[in-house]
Every structure is written in structure tokens, then in C-alpha cells.
Amino acid sequence: MYSNDGFRELDRQECLRLLAKAPVGRVVHTRHALPAVLPVNFCLDPDSAVLLRTASDSELSRAIDGVVVAFEADEVDAVAHSAWSVVVTGRATVVTDLAEHGRLSRTGPRSWVPSPEEVFIRIEAELVTGRELVGGRTLYGVDLSS
């Protein structure tokens, strides 16, 4: 069912299905007491956690280890006037377990900017929300299909 603004709320399973096909997302965290947004490549772990891979000495790994962050991914089709957006909110932690790090080295995301010493960051999918706009729907009374 679409709301008055033309968007449809997505359930958790729909959100995770869409998130799994997105190549890039954004980590939203606090930097110097201000909001910061950083684009990153990622993948989903079988338990639905968002996995990132970054340099062990990166500002990102220091800034988000042990804190609650948001992670957002989306897809927009400007021609069809359709889009979806999914937000995962949860605690981020640097993976320190050696066995888990080994598993993620084989199955986790590949860094687009490799570093000699990399860490994996897990963002637990504690809260998962999403919205979808399908082409041809109206937004604020304006027909988006034309």
C-alpha cells in the first residue's frame, strides 16, 4: 500500500533483498560532533549484518568501532521515476576474532582501495527500514509518469 506521498514502506525482508544487490552504500556517523557520510562498498553477511573492509588505521575504523551508526543504500531510476532506499541502524564493531577475520577474508567485501593491513567492520542490522517509489505514482499531487 502506498502512502499519501507516493512511497511504499518496505518490510525487513524486502529491505535486505534490495540491499544485497547494491554495490555501494553510505555510512552515517559522527565526526567531530557533526554528521558525516562516507560512501563505501559493502556486502551482507548471512546473518544480515553489513560488512565493510577498510584500512586498519583509517579514520573510519576508529570513528565507528563500538558506536551506533546508520548505513544507507539506494537505487534510483530517473527515467522510470522509481527508486528505493534502505537504512540499517546498529552497532558497528571492528572484527577482532582471527577465525572470523579469516572467514571474511574469503567471503567478505573486497576493498576498492586495498591496504596492507585491513580490518572488517560489522554493522548489526538492529533496525532495518526502507521505502520504495514506483514509476507512475504521484508525489505531492504531481504525476511522475510524464
Image (cartoon, helix red, strand yellow):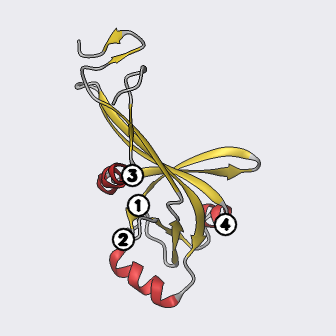
Asked whether the beta carbons under mark 1 and mark 3 sit within 8 Å of each other, the answer is: yes
CA separation, marks 2 and 3?
A: 18 Å
The residue type indicated by label 3 comes to: Val
- How many numbered tags mark residues here? 4
For label 1, the residue is 42
Q: Kindly identify the residue that appears in the image at 38 percent across and 63 percent down.
A: 43
Residue 27 image offset from top left, x and y in percent: 54, 52
Q: Tell which circle, 2 or 4, labels the residue nearer the N-terminal end.
A: 2
The residue carrying pointer 3 sits among few (fewer than 14), some (14 to 19) or many (20 or more) residues within 10 Å by Cα, namely some
The residue type indicated by label 2 comes to: Pro
The residue carrying pointer 4 sits among few (fewer than 14), some (14 to 19) or many (20 or more) residues within 10 Å by Cα, namely few
- Which dot, 2 or 3, sits closer to the camera? 2
Q: Tell which circle, 1 or 3, labels the residue nearer the N-terminal end.
A: 3
Q: Above or below — where is 43 with respect to 6?
A: below
Q: Tell which circle, 3 or 4, labels the residue nearer the N-terminal end.
A: 3
* Residue 62: mark in rendering: 4
For label 2, the residue is 46
CA separation, marks 3 and 4?
A: 21 Å
- Which dot, 2 or 4, sits closer to the camera? 2
* Residue 55: mark in rendering: none
For label 3, the residue is 24
